[in-house]
Image (cartoon, coloured by chain):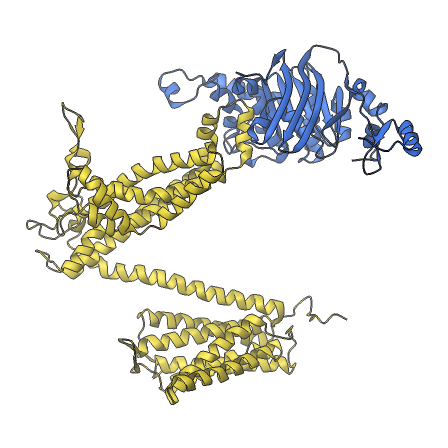
Chain colours: A blue, B yellow
Amino acid sequence: MSQPDTDEMTANRTENQGVATTAGETVEETRPEWTSYDADGDTKLAVDDLDVHYGDDHALKSVTMDIPEKSVTALIGPSGCGKSTYLRCLNRMNDRIRVADIDGTVKLDGEDIYQDGVDLVELRKRVGMVFQNPNPFPKSIRDNVSYGPRKHGDIDTGLLARLTGRAEPEREEQLVKRSLKRAALWDEVSDRLDDNALGLSGGQQQRLCISRCLAVDPEVILMDEPASALDPIATSKIEDLIEDLAEDYTVVVVTHSMQQAARVSDQTAVFLTGGELVEYDDTEKIFENPESQRVEDYISGKFG
Amino acid sequence: MSRATKTALVRGDSSMYEAAAAGAVGLSGVVFAVGLLALLDITAIETLVAGVELSVAFGALLLLIGISVVGFGVTSRIEYVETGAQPSAGFVAAAAFTGIWFAVGMILSGVVAPGIGVQIAAGAVFGGIGFGATAFPREDIGSTVPAGALAVLCGVVLTSGIVGPDWEQVLTGYNATLFGDTVVPGIVMFASLVTGWSAAKAYGGFGARGRNVGAYVLIYLVVLSILAVLLGLIAFVTVKGLPGLFNGFSLGGENLFSWPFLTNGAGLLADIGGVFPALMGTVWLVIGAVLFAVPTGVGAAIFLSEYAEQGRFTGLVEVATNGLWSTPSIVFGLFGAAFLIPRFGNEKSLLAGMLTLGFMLLPLVLITSREALLAVPDEYRDASAALGVSKWQTIRSVVLPAAIPGVTTGVILGVGRIAGETAPILLTMGGGVLPAKSAAPNVLGGFQFTTSPPFVSNPALLEATSALPYQLYALITAGLSGNIQNPQEYAWGLALTLLLVVLLFYAIGITTRYYFRQKLHQ
C-alpha cells in the first residue's frame, strides 16, 4: 500500500489508526494483539497461520486462533468474510472442494490434521458437523441416528448380524434414545421412530441432524449457521441446546445473528470482509467494548 | 390512460352467450371424438344417423358449429355482449390461419383448375385473406370468422356429398389412392379442432382468459387423440390376438388350468400350436441382458459421477454413450454376429443374444443412472462425510438408495426396447421358426458341473433359441404354417403375447420403482 504521504492522509491515518486504500477510504489495520486471546481452559483446536485460496480468491488470510475445550466459540461476520470457510477447515470438509488450497496448521489435541497420513474418516468422527440447511437422510428417524455408529461398526443391525446373533437391538435402541434425548428431540418423536425423517418440521430436522452427529460421539461439533433456516421458536430451542452441549463438547458455531452469538457463546471471533480475523475475545468484551473500530461498527450495524 | 382492456373482476352468472359457447365447445369435442372413432375404423362413416349417412351428419354439425362460431365473434364485436377482446388475435393465430387458408386455396383451385401456378396463386390469395381476416380485425372477429368459415366450408363439402363415403382420389405421382373413409374423418377432426378452440375462446370472453380456455381445449383434444391412438393400437392387437391366445384355454379339468398357447410348442405332436419356446427365449433374453447391463451400467455411472473428475473425459464418455444409445440395433446385431458368435462355438446362441441385447441396454442404463446419481443432493454426501463415513459406504447406503427410482426408470425404458428387438437376435440367436416344446431353453436345469475347466457349463445357453419378436418376423416373412391350423390367428396371438410380456416387465419395473420411492418418502 504505497500511498502518497500527504498531510491529509497522515492526519486521517492517525485518527483512525488505519491505512488508506486505493479507493481513498481508510481501512483500519488489524493488530495482532486483538486476536491473541488466551482463553481459560485447555486448547482443543489450535489454528496457526491458516490461509485458504479458492483459485485466485484469497478466502482466508493467515488466521491464528486457539479454541478452548468444552465451550462455545462463535464466529461472526458479514457474508463472504470467510467464517464458513474457516469452520470447514476444522474437519477438512474443504478438501471436498477441488479448487481449495489450504496452508497452515490446525492442531486437534496437539496433532496437526493437515499433515500427511491423517485419516479423514477418524478425524470427522472426532470433529462432527451440523449444516445450515437441515439435511436428514431420506430414511427413518431411527436409521438417521444410528447411521454413523452402524457405519463405524459400533452397532450392527445387518442381516448377517441378525443371522449370526451378533445384532444388539437393545444397544441400538439405547443409543438412539440417548442421542435423541441429548438433542431434546426424544419427547417429540419417541412414538414414531420408524417414520421418515423428511416428515419432521425444519426445527425438528435440525435437531435430528444434531442428534445424528452426537450419536457418533464426537469431541468437537462444528455448526454452520444451524438456525438460520428456522423460525424463532425452533431457533431458541437450538440455542438452548448449544449452551447445553458445551458441557460435554467443544462447540464452534458460525452465525449471522449477533444476538445469537451474544446469547450462546463464551468467546467470539469476528471475521470481516477479505477473510481476515479482526478480533477474538470473550464474548462480553467483543460486544461491549471491542478494540477495533471496524468491529464496533459491524456490531452496532454501521457496516457489513 | 392505459390501452389494456379491462374486464370485470367478478364475472356474473353464465349468460346465454356463455352457455351457447360452451355448447359449441362440447359439440366440437363430440364431433372430434366421433371423427376419431371413424378414423380408427371403429365406426363407419356410412352408418345412418337420423336417416342420413354419418358423413352428411358430420357436415351438418360442422355447418351449425361454424355459423355459431361466427355468430359469437359478431355478437361480441357489435358489443351486444361484453367481452375482454384484445385489439388483435395475435401473431400465432394469424400465421396458423394463413397456413390453413393457403392450403384450402391450393386444394380448391386444384379441383377447379389444376396447375401448379394457378394453385399457388389461389393459395396465396386465400392465405392472404385468411391473414387479413385474422390479423386486422379485433380479436373477437379475428379468431372466430376464419375458423367458422373453415367449418362452414367443410360442412358444405360434406353435406353436399362432394366428399363422402364413396369418394376416392388417385394421387397422381404416388402409387396410392385416398378414400373417403380416411379423408372425411380427417376433415371433420381438423375442422372441429379449430372450432373447438375458437368456441372456447368465445366461452372465456376472449382476452387473456379466452386464450387460456382456448389453449386448454386445444391441448385436451390433442391429448385425447394421442390416447385414442394408443388405446386403439392396443385394442386392435388385443381383439385380433385374443382368439389365438386363448385357443383351447380351459379352467379346471386334470390340471388346475390348461393354456396350450403359452405352454405348448409348435411341433407336430402338439394339438394346439403354442409359443412356449419363444416365450421362454424372450424371458431369458431380457433376464440375461438385465443381469449383464445393470451391474456394469450402474457401476460405470457410479465411477463417472462420484469418482471421476468432471471434465473432458467424462464429457467424452457421455457423448460416446449417447451415441451408442442411438446406434441402430442391426449394427449391434452385426457386431454380435461377427464378434460374439465365433467366441461361443461359432453358432448362434442364447448367450450371444443376451450379451448383444445387454450391449444395447448398457448405454441407457448408464445415462439414466448417471442422471439419477447427479440428482442426489450433495447435502447427503456432505452430511455423511461429516459423520466420518467413508466415500464407498456413503455411496452404498445413502447415494444409491436415493438414486434407485431413477435407475429403475432407465431399466424399464431399456427393457421395453430390447424385449421387442428383432434385428439383433435375428443375427445372433436364430432358432426355429416353429420350434417344438423341446426346443425351449432350459436355463435353470441346464447347469452341469464338469471336472475340467470351466467346471460349470450350460448347454441351454449355447443353443440357438427362438424369441417372440423373431418368431413373429419369421412367420410373417417366411409364410410358414407347419401344422398350425390357423397361422393368422397364431401370429396375432403371438403379437399379443409379446405385448403382454413387455407390459409385464413394465409392471414389474414400475412396482419396483414405486416400492423404493415409498421407502424414500413414506
Residue reaching furthest to the left: B269
How many marks do you count on the picture?
Answer: 0
Q: Quadrant of residue B190?
A: bottom left
Q: Quadrant of residue B52?
A: bottom left
A295, A52: nearer the viewer: A52
Could you tell whether B124 is left or right of B411 in the image? Answer: right
| Residue B85 drawn at (x, y percent) | 63, 74
Residue at 47% x, 33% y is B306
Q: Quadrant of residue A92?
A: top right
A19, B130: nearer the viewer: A19
| Residue A88 drawn at (x, y percent) | 62, 26
Q: Is residue A48 visible?
A: yes
Could you tell whether B312 is left or right of B41 in the image? Answer: right
| Residue B361 drawn at (x, y percent) | 33, 44
Could you tell whether A197 is left or right of B344 in the image? Answer: right
A303, B379: nearer the viewer: A303
Q: Is residue A35 above or below residue A204?
A: above
Could you tell whether B398 is left or right of B141 in the image? Answer: left
- Quarter of the picture holding the N terminus of chain B: bottom right
Residue at 81% x, 28% y is A295
Q: Is residue B442 visible?
A: no
Q: Is residue A94 above or below residue A216?
A: below
| Residue A199 drawn at (x, y percent) | 55, 36
